[in-house]
Structures are given as C-alpha cells and as structure tokens.
Amino acid sequence: MTELSTLADRVPPVSRARAALFKRLADLVCLPASRVNVFERSIVADLLIELLREATPDERRRVARRLSVLSELPAMLARLLLRDEISVAAALIEDCPALRDVDLVDCARMGAAEHRRLIAQRRGVSEVVADALIETGDLSALEVLLRNDLARLSPAGTERVVALTRDAPRLIGPLLRRPELRPSQAYVLFWWADADARRAVLQRFAVSREVLQDAVGDIFAMAAAEGWSDPLSRKALQFIERRQRNRAAIDKSPFASLDDAVTAAGRGMTREIAEEISYLSGLKPATGAKIMADIGGEPLAVLCKAVGLPRAALLDLWRGLRRPEVDAAGAPAPALARVLEVFDIIAVDRAQTVLRYWNWSLSSALTPALIKALREGDEGAVDEYSPPQRAAMLVMSSDFGR
C-alpha cells in the first residue's frame, strides 16, 4: 500500500447527506412568509448558524450564494456570513438586496479591507453606512465610496472626509466631484490641494453673490441709517457687498492707496507692508498672512482679482515675496504662469466670494476658545463649533504647531 493511498483512507469521504442538509436548510430559510412563519424561520436559521460554524469554506460559500437572493434575511445569519472570509461574504455584499444598514455597518467595522471595499461599491449606499466606512479611515474603501455615484454622504461624513484629505490627497479628486460637497468645504481643502484641484475648486465652487446682492440691496441703506449698530447684520452685509477694499483703512495708512502699498511690496515685502495690504484689502492680518505664506501662490491671484488690482500688481507681490519669476532655462517659472492663469480665469465677484469666506472662517471665527483648541489639538469637540469655526480649525491647525 502506497503512502498516498494510506492518506486517502484517512480523509473522510464527502457526505452527501451533509451537502443535502445544508441545501434543505438554506431552502427553508428562503421560503416565502406564506410557507413558513417567522418563528419557524428563526429556528431553521439558528440550526443553520450552528452548522455553519463548523462547515468548510466551500459549504459556507454555497449557503451564502443561496441566501443572497432573499428579500428578507435572518439578522444573526446575515451577521455570521458577513463577518466570514471575503470569498464567503462577497456573495451577500455584492448581490443581496435584503441586507439592512445595521448589517452593513457591522461588516464595515468588523470585516477586513476587502469587505469595506465591496460595501463601498454597492448600489445605493446609505448615509449611515457611508458614515461607518468613513469612520474606519480605510482610504482605499473611501476612494471607492467617493467614486460611487449611487452612494449618499451625510453632511457630517462629508466634513470628516474633507479633514481626511489633508493627509490623504488621493481623496481630493473624487471628493470634488461629489454633489454633497459644499462651497465652504471646498474653500477649506483648497489650502492643501494640488494645483489641478485648486483650479477645479475655483472653477466649480467660486460662486457669484449676485442673488444675495439683489435680494438685500435696500437693506444697506437701512443699516447705514442705523449707523451699522447691529453687529450681526453688519457681518452679513460685509460678506454680501460688492466693494472689497476697505476705504476707512486709507485714513490710517501710511500709503495713499492699496496700489501704492503693493508697489512698495514689490521692492521688498515686510511684515508691516503685508499687514497694510491686508487692512486695505478688507482682510484681517491672519488671513493676509495665510495668503502670502501659501506655497502655491494661487491665493495671491484670488486676492488681486477680488480687490481690482491689475496683473502688474500680482507680479509686484510675487516679486516682493521673492518667488522665482523664471526657471533655470530663463523661461517663465511654471508656478508664476499657473498663478497668472488663475488670475485670468476667475471673475471679480467670484474671487470676492472666496476671499471673504477665507477671511470669515480664518479670522472672525478664531475665538479665544477655538485658538486654545487649535493649540491643544482638540479636534474632537467638532459639534461645539460653527461651520466657519470648524473650517478655521482645519485650515489653521498646522499654523499652531500641529
């Protein structure tokens, strides 16, 4: 007798009865409510669960495929199979319409990366399931989710993805195509996006305020008659108004105009000149500093267009900040060419919308409590802050030593 024949004698033969038993029990679970009541189905499911715990992967796969056609699936049976290895769980994740959100959420949290990827590409992923996937931080699954046009993201989930993009730039492209992304969120991720993504933000999300201006045009006169005494209405009207430059700042400035300040900056930018440019542009110094410190340079184009400065002024700022104007071969520097292109394509009103949101979120929203949270890295208490405050927390946290 050979060694192979001896080993074959020790392997138990495939049991026809066992295979038939699994099939019959699966068939019973699949019977319509007119044939088996809920208690009978529950008993069958309990027995099937006990058998599946000791079944082979092939047997579990066959049962999963049989159950994937059900319109109603016992919860414990679904959970057991969804937590199984991906070759078993895939039949249910991909094809079973009876899976509840709670089943998919459990699978997202307890399953492996491949489980989450298959969940992310299901048709009609709900906000609850999407939130669970986002909470796992699985970037591969999130990229699939963002590319799934039939998935839905909640406002809170979208905001969490925006925060994730700072350290995961691969998510920015698909996120920018999502219908759930609001302009305010796009303006936030702009700060850490690459050149192509920044261009997409400005082309898609830099919206006009014409509707707002038409709707509240007469309220400016009312507020002026009251001496702009109400801070809430003053804040809103400052965001809506067409004028960007701060005329009142001219009286206190050593420069005759914003144009003169920019010309001086071209000869050499100093902190004092940068602050004057910010004040004369209707910005807080924190916003102006963020714009001028930006490596890419596109915010400078937004600033110049919003305040009505010409191309030459943008070049003065570029030169004053000691940015390269030509490359090693003597050709125009690619970064400068890109920034000039942004200046050319964005309209004044749309540039003002972006600039004013930056100023609103990066300066007026920075309360002492928020600054303390930034310094301590407390991004957990998100619900305590308003949308502009959360935007400031995302954008400015790196400026506070994080």
Image: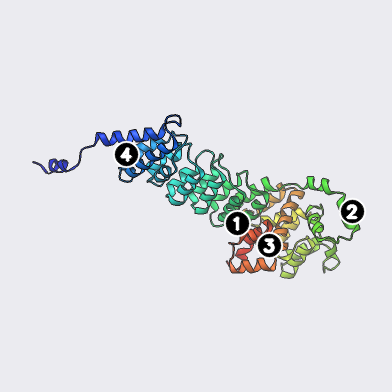
Q: Tag 3: Cα neighbours inside 10 Å, few (<14), some, or many (≥20)?
A: some
What residue is rendered at 36% in x and 37% in y? 63
The answer to whether one can see residue 352 in this image is: yes
Which of discs 4 and 2 lies nearer the camera? The answer is 4
Which of discs 1 and 3 lies nearer the camera? The answer is 1
**In the rendered image, which residue does mark 4 sit on?**
59
Looking at the picture, how far across and down is residue 307, in whole percent?
Answer: 78, 55
Q: Amino acid at mark 1?
A: Trp
What residue is rendered at 55% in x and 45% in y? 146
Q: Amino acid at mark 3?
A: Met
Label 4 element class = helix
Mark closest to the chain's N terminus, 1 or 2: 1
Which disc number belongs to residue 221? Answer: 2
Cα separation between marks 4 and 3? 64 Å
Looking at the picture, how far across and down is residue 375, in whole percent?
Answer: 61, 69
Looking at the picture, how far across and down is residue 187, in whole percent?
Answer: 66, 53
**In the rendered image, which residue does mark 1 sit on?**
192
Q: Tag 4: Cα neighbours inside 10 Å, few (<14), some, or many (≥20)?
A: some
Which of discs 4 and 3 lies nearer the camera? The answer is 4
Mark closest to the chain's N terminus, 1 or 3: 1
Mark closest to the chain's N terminus, 3 or 2: 2
Q: Nearer the viewer, residue 349 or 36?
A: 36
Cα separation between marks 4 and 2? 78 Å
**In the rendered image, which residue does mark 3 sit on?**
292
Which disc number belongs to residue 60? Answer: none
Label 3 element class = helix
Q: Nearer the viewer, residue 13 or 123?
A: 13
Mark closest to the chain's N terminus, 4 or 3: 4
Which of discs 1 and 2 lies nearer the camera? The answer is 2
